[in-house]
Image (spheres, rainbow, N blue to C red):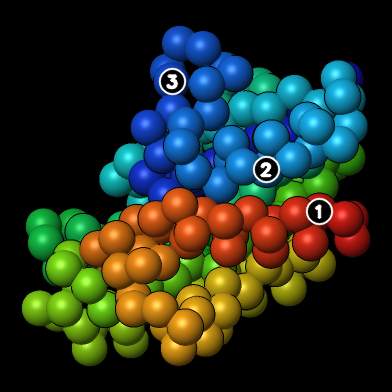
């Protein structure tokens, strides 16, 4: 049985269980697991190791326990918005250059330890909402910088990159921002479905 790992922050965490791996939360990891589990019975095992509040340095700090030791066949990483949000709220963020450097080191170590693991990089994103509107210009500009660095890191290691910001920007033409991202950061059911569809689309190209 092949294993699929979802890694990231609260967007990935989505209230997953810490004790039971099959309880993968209420977000896109569960939507992916549902579709793939139905289409390919007993072919995949799913791990969700997203942790709310994580920045790229926090994911990197967990690389041994929550990535390498799990030895996934396929994994995805979505991280970046907290690197901005924690700077705005706590003066404890990760600037864009350090974000890129840590991301690169993390990918290098994963590829060295798990050369056969297929890795997908998801683009961090943000919309105007209750959590972001007070510092909207900063949020938008800084998350964009992290998105560009995530794409650059993916290109450096020739990894698939899943763009999401543009799709969300298009989606708000159909419904308000909080229809997709509850507070400008955390997806609603529809927002998670958007991510899931892009995840599956890239998965099928691996």
What element does badge 2 sit on? Answer: helix
Q: Would you name the residue on which mark 3 appears? A: 17
Q: Earlier in the sequence, mark 1 or mark 3?
A: 3
Q: Earlier in the sequence, mark 2 or mark 3?
A: 3
Compared to residue 172, the image places residue 64 above or below, namely above
Closer to viewer: mark 2 or mark 1: 2
Q: Residue at x 58, y 36 (%)?
A: 30
Q: Earlier in the sequence, mark 2 or mark 1?
A: 2
Q: Would you name the residue on which mark 1 appears? A: 203
Closer to viewer: mark 2 or mark 3: 2
User: In this rendering, does residue 40 appear at all?
Assistant: yes
Give the quarter of the image for residue 115.
Answer: top right
Which label sits on residue 32?
2
Badge 2 density bin: few <14, some 14–19, many ≥20, Cα 10 Å: many
Cα–Cα gap, marks 1 and 3: 24 Å
Left or right of residue 38, residue 176 in this image? left
User: In this rendering, does residue 154 appear at all?
Assistant: no
Cα–Cα gap, marks 2 and 1: 10 Å
Left or right of residue 153, residue 12 in this image? left
Image quarter where the C terminus lies is bottom right
């Amino acid at each position: 049985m092949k294993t699929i790992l979802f890694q990231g922050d609260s967007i990935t965490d989505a209230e997953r269980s810490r004790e039971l791996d099959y309880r993968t939360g209420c977000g896109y990891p569960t939507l992916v697991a549902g579709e793939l589990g139905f289409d390919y019975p007993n072919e995949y095992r799913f791990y969700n190791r997203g942790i709310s509040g994580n920045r790229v340095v926090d994911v990197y700090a967990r690389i041994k326990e929550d990535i390498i030791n799990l030895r996934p066949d396929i994994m995805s990483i979505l991280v970046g918005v907290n690197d901005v949000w924690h700077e705005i709220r706590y003066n404890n963020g990760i600037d864009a250059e350090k974000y890129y450097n840590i991301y690169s080191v993390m990918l290098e170590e994963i590829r060295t330890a798990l050369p056969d693991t297929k890795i997908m990089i998801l683009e961090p994103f943000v919309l105007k909402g209750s959590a972001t509107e007070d510092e909207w210009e900063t949020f938008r500009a800084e998350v964009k910088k992290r998105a560009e660095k995530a794409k650059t890191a993916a290109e450096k290691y020739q990894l698939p990159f899943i763009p999401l910001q543009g799709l969300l920007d298009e989606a708000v033409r159909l419904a308000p921002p909080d229809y997709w991202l509850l507070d400008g950061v955390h997806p609603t059911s529809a927002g998670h479905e958007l991510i899931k569809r892009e995840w599956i689309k890239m998965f099928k190209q691996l």
